[in-house]
Image (spheres, helix red, strand yellow):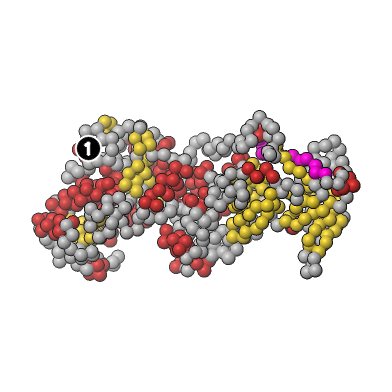
Amino acid sequence: MSHRTPAPAPHNAKPAKAAAPEAVKPSNFLRQIIEQDLAKATYATRHWGGSPGDAAHHAAGQPDPAKIRTRFPPEPNGYLHIGHAKSICLNFGLARDYGGVCHLRFDDTNPEKEDVEYVNSIIDAVKWLGFDWTANGNAHLYQASDYFDFMYRAAEYLIEAGHAYVDEQTVEQIRINRGDFGKPGVDSPFRARTPAENLARFREMRDHQHEDGSMVLRAKIDMASPNINLRDPAIYRIRRATHHNTGDKWCIYPMYTFAHPIEDALENITHSICTLEFEDQRPFYDWLMERLTEGGLLSAPPPHQYEFARLNLTYVVTSKRKLAQLVYDHKVSGWDDPRMPTIVGLRRRGYTPEALQLFAERIGVTKSDSWIDYSTLEGCLREMLDSTATRAMAVLDPVKLVLTNWDEVMGAGTLDDCSAPIHPHHPELGKRAFKIGKEVWIDRTDFEETPPKGFFRLFPGNKVRLKYGHVIECSGCTKDADGKITEVLASLIPDTKSGTPGSDAVKVKGVITWVAVADGLPVEVRMYDRLFIEAQPDAGGKDFIEGLNPNSLKVVTAFVEPSLVAAKADEKFQFERHGYFVADRVDHSGTKPVFNLAVGLKDSWGK
């Protein structure tokens, strides 16, 4: 039976999603760069061959329909987190705003750590955040491993042009001979080999003739460069590992710093946006682009790399290794534990795509590192859910309230009908209906035998209103043998029901929420808090495990009003006076209702 009264809106109608908070996007240095490039027509002469490819492939195509091309290039070796959400919003958002296209590309050049499970989770996360890589009838979903053939061809070109050589030093010898910031590097004894000798050895590497780690292909740049990343960086290594996409075709794999610029160029990327830790790699990016464009392998003008500050969020760790440790050491229930900063965890916690997009917009894009307080993220969710989440009453720490004169005033066994707006700002959604009777559940904190100063809720002799119901006057309580309160006692004041004539004749200072014993729905509520008690749990080499919050999860049995009997997984509600909650997307069902605390009604952390 439905507990919502008829209304113009359907039973499960929801308020419209909140509009974008700002019609005009705030400027930042990336937007300024893009606008300058568009004004100068920097990439206006490019052609697009319909798919990624080399210079000849694109030259045979049509003028590129995309004004700019960006990309989101995750490595499929884990679940995406809040930092990736910022990058997704940034790259897809810039492409959207400037008539461009954003590619989703899997940087799958490390076969030992990558898996199809992560590929699928990344696709799901980007879609859930509200973005799509389809444009002009084409799906721009790519994977770096599809370019292995070209990368190998590019490596052979560098060897033949004298820009690369095979080094057979040990890993330790290479490290020592590389030098440091105060000492230039030392040339490898293999650096002077002829291109023909290097090409022969590289092909032996490709043909399984040498052991893993026995040799690498290095770019020949400058062993005395003040930028250590230009001291003949490795660009290929031997690694016998089955790749999830290419299988056992290859036993040599490109290094990320070599593969990434090539991927960008093959895909006609204009603005390659990454985080600041890659700033020192930009000279190699540019060096490689210059070598391969002058050799005619890649189109000109080549892409350019730009760096922005990564997201540093308090009370969070975003290292994939550390997040994996939390999962595999069973500190959390999984990658989608609602306390995790992963996108799947945030989604299960009750975060919405709109809240994460608002967060990314609000924190902006800069080139300087700073810390964003976790309350900023929570505030964005609170702001979005306020206008979209339907309301309900819930009692999280229940104690029974007995209205001792109910039978006399209302009649024995009588249940009175009450109602409340589904959403106070959306009257078109109608009302929700519930009962009130002799016994109701109230929160234990709403009663005090000896009230502190300023306490306006239930205590002997005080009157309060049961929200949407009647005014009552407290007369005391009953206790068990241990002194624990088992029932609160009160009397009903006649003719005070909300919405009836004269209901406000009795003035009260306190209003409390409640759920009738007769129709209340018992549910499991998971009260989540921040996973760490320290603002920077892994700063300065600290053991982040020691900063775990021992009270980050409390599971309670609560009672909620009957309108929630129809709640669907992922549906969000405001439990009045408590906060915003979501029906758990994994464990919630009609026979076992489970709700997660998404965020409180106000920021109370540390207060």
Question: What element does badge 1 sit on?
Answer: helix
| Residue 158 magenta-highlighted | no
Q: Is residue 400 above or below residue 264?
A: below
What is the quadrant of residue 264 in the picture? top left
| Residue 417 magenta-highlighted | yes
- Image x and y of residue 116, in percent: 37, 51
Quarter of the rendering occupied by the N terminus: top right
- Tell me what residue is drawn at x 64 percent, y 32 percent: 9
Left or right, 42 with respect to 343, comes to left
- Image x and y of residue 333, in percent: 51, 59
Magenta stretch, residue numbers: 414-426
Q: Is residue 557 among what the camera can see?
A: yes
Q: Please state which amino acid type lies under the numbered disc 1.
A: His
- Tell me what residue is drawn at x 53 percent, y 37 percent: 20
Q: Is residue 67 among what the camera can see?
A: no
* Circle 1 residue: 57
